[in-house]
Image (tube, grey):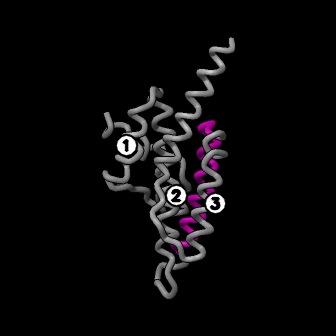
């Protein structure tokens, strides 16, 4: 099922992205596995898994492009523009998928990572952990709401 989930996700993302941007999204199996293991721990509908993997993919590739921004690199401008486009696309895609709560939850950690990287801190960022924490929090809130009713 993971292979189908990954294929469906990448197909959806490529259909949503502007062809003018010329960006091909791809993640290694290990990068995908970080979020896939999170998704398996949560009882989610298939479409939501596709959306969450899509958001994760966009964020991961955007961060990778910005990590490749080193002075005098022949692709410096392209990497900056690709990363910036992908962060905008992330927001657009998340809104379309109705994942605004996730965006709000991840915003502080994404901003902290971006500021750190602009100051030369290139420590590994694991967005899958943020997704897991968000899904746990979301499940707890649903549980409290259903008990209150």
Characterize the local packing of mark 2: few (<14), some (14-19) or many (20 or more) Cα atoms within 10 angstroms.
Answer: few
Q: Nearer the viewer, mark 3 or mark 2?
A: 3
* Main SS of residues in magenta: helix
In this figure, which residue is indicated by the disc labeled 3?
111
Which quadrant would residue 3 be assigned to in this image? Answer: top left
Q: Earlier in the sequence, mark 1 or mark 3?
A: 1
User: In which quarter of the view is residue 108 placed?
Assistant: bottom right
Crowd band around label 3 with a 10 angstrom C-alpha radius: few (<14), some (14–19), many (20+): few
Foreground residue among 88 and 129: 129
For the C terminus, the quadrant is: top right
Q: Is residue 101 visible?
A: yes
User: What residue sits 63% from the left and 45% below the top?
Assistant: 105
Q: Which residue is mark 1?
A: 6
Q: Left or right: 60 with respect to 87?
A: left
Q: Which residues are magenta?
A: 78-99
**Compared with residue 140, is residue 127 higher up or lower down, i.e. above or below?**
below
Task: Inspect the magenta stretch and tell me whether residue 76 lies in it.
Answer: no
Which residue is pictured at 51% across the width and 79% down the height? 76
Q: Secondary structure at mark 3?
A: helix
Labelled disc at residue 19 = 2
Contact check, label 2 and label 1, Cβ < 8 Å: no
Q: Report whether 148 appears left or right of 119.
A: right
């Amino acid at each position: 099922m993971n292979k189908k989930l990954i294929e469906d996700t990448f197909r959806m993302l490529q259909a949503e992205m502007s062809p003018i941007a010329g960006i091909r999204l791809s993640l290694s199996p290990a990068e995908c596995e970080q979020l896939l293991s999170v998704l398996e721990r949560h009882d989610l509908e298939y479409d939501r898994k596709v959306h969450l993997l899509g958001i994760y993919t966009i964020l991961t590739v955007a961060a990778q492009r910005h990590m490749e921004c080193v002075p005098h690199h022949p692709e410096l401008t392209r990497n900056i523009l690709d990363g910036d486009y992908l962060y905008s696309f992330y927001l657009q895609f998340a809104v379309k998928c109705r994942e605004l709560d996730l965006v709000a939850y991840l915003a502080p950690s994404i901003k902290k990572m971006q500021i750190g990287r602009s100051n030369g801190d290139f420590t590994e960022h694991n967005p899958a952990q943020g997704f897991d924490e968000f899904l746990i929090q979301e499940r707890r809130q649903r549980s409290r709401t259903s008990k209150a009713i």
